[in-house]
Image (cartoon, grey):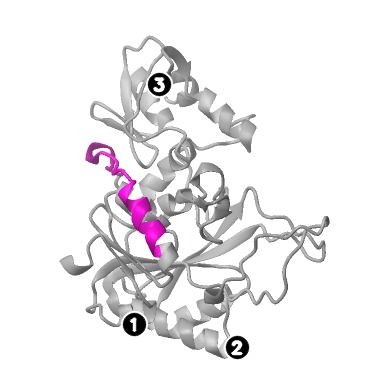
Amino acid sequence: MNQEFKNKLINGDSLEELKKIPDESFDLVFADPPYNLQLKNELTRPDRSKVSAVNDKWDQFESFKKYDDFTYAWLSECKRILKKDGAIWVIGSYHNIFRVGTAIQNLGFWILNDVIWNKKNPMPNFRGTRFTNAHETLIWASKSEKSKYTFNYQSLKCLNDDLQMRSNWDLPICSGTERLKKNGKKVHSTQKPEALLHRILLATSNKNDLVLDPFLGSGTTATVAKKLSRNYFGIEKEKAYFKVATQRLKDTKVIEDDYLDTLKNNRSKPRIPFGSLVELGIIKPGTTIFDNKKKISAKIMADGSIKHAQTEGSIHKVAATILGAESCNGWTYWHYNLNGLVVPIDRLRQRLINNS
């Protein structure tokens, strides 16, 4: 691994900084490029109050050709600096993702999936002239058709309560205490939620991999990479964002190494995977859970699996193994400590359902 790019942030122009990086340096790229939203007027609510929309200069291009030239330039550099078995994620909206997808294919990447991020709490369409934009699209592609890319299938299945993870992801937008603000205003207009990056990095990278974000913004990719013991390298042109990302990383704690291992490769209630509680920070990796008599315990891992002695898997699978049964409802079997009280982990699920 090139130590020069390990766990560092650069305040500079992406295109210029990417050119300085040696060939085949990175295992994974996550890119959240400008969307070229083409907003020409202020957005207002029915009461005429102003909507905080994306009207930053970095998102504005003179023409589609200018945007395409920019897209081909940074994607070409990313392909060059990806290892032969590396992969890239690019996120976008209807404004740009189709143009980006065309460039990805024309440059010889091999598209593995397009993933729909369904936003649980999207911004409404105040003018009432179109459908509410409630999703964004991610493209996941390997460097080439022959690349032996990373995909932690079992961990993603465990994160999703022993069901295959599908390509439509229901996750909230960045809000509440996670949303970075200064003097009551958003620090970054398009800050991505950590839950989204948690799933991406857990699925398609391994501990100690080197992950690049060429448009770092407020630093979400690097923050989650640090938590999951991935090495990160981020480039951000805007000085204000760079300062915020730098401080955010200083405040970020790494998940203990013992809880970072990932698994090798029927309900009347709304289905909430246990892994969602981990992704959203409702329950943290390393937390001890136990049966109602506190005689049997297990530790929660970063991918939503749990580990008891030599047994690991989903909350349901591990509980069934302990009981010698074909199946078991882990939500009611496992408990946690709430201010000295032994409470079923199902309480956490109910809290998430009630807040949805």
Q: Which residues are magenta?
A: 242-262
Query: Which residue position is annotated with label 1?
Result: 16
Q: Is residue 260 magenta?
A: yes
Residue type at the position of mark 3? Ala
Mark in the foreground, 3 or 1:
1
**Residue at numbered disc 3:** 325
Determine which of the numbered discs, if any, sits on residue 161 in the image: none
Question: Is residue 108 in view from this perspective?
Answer: no
Does residue 6 appear left or right of residue 294 in this picture?
A: left
Q: Earlier in the sequence, mark 3 or mark 2?
A: 2
* x, y percent for residue 112: 44, 67
Could you classify mark 1 by the number of other residues whose Cα lies within 10 Å: few (under 14), some (14-19), or many (20 or more)? Answer: few
Residue drawn where x is 23% and y is 79% of the image: 23
Secondary structure category for the residue under label 2 = loop
Sequence order check, earlier mark of 3 and 1? 1
Residue where numbered disc 2 is placed: 63
Residue 297, image x, y percentages: 32, 20
Seen at 40% across and 77% down, the residue is 109
* Amino acid marked by disc 2: Ser
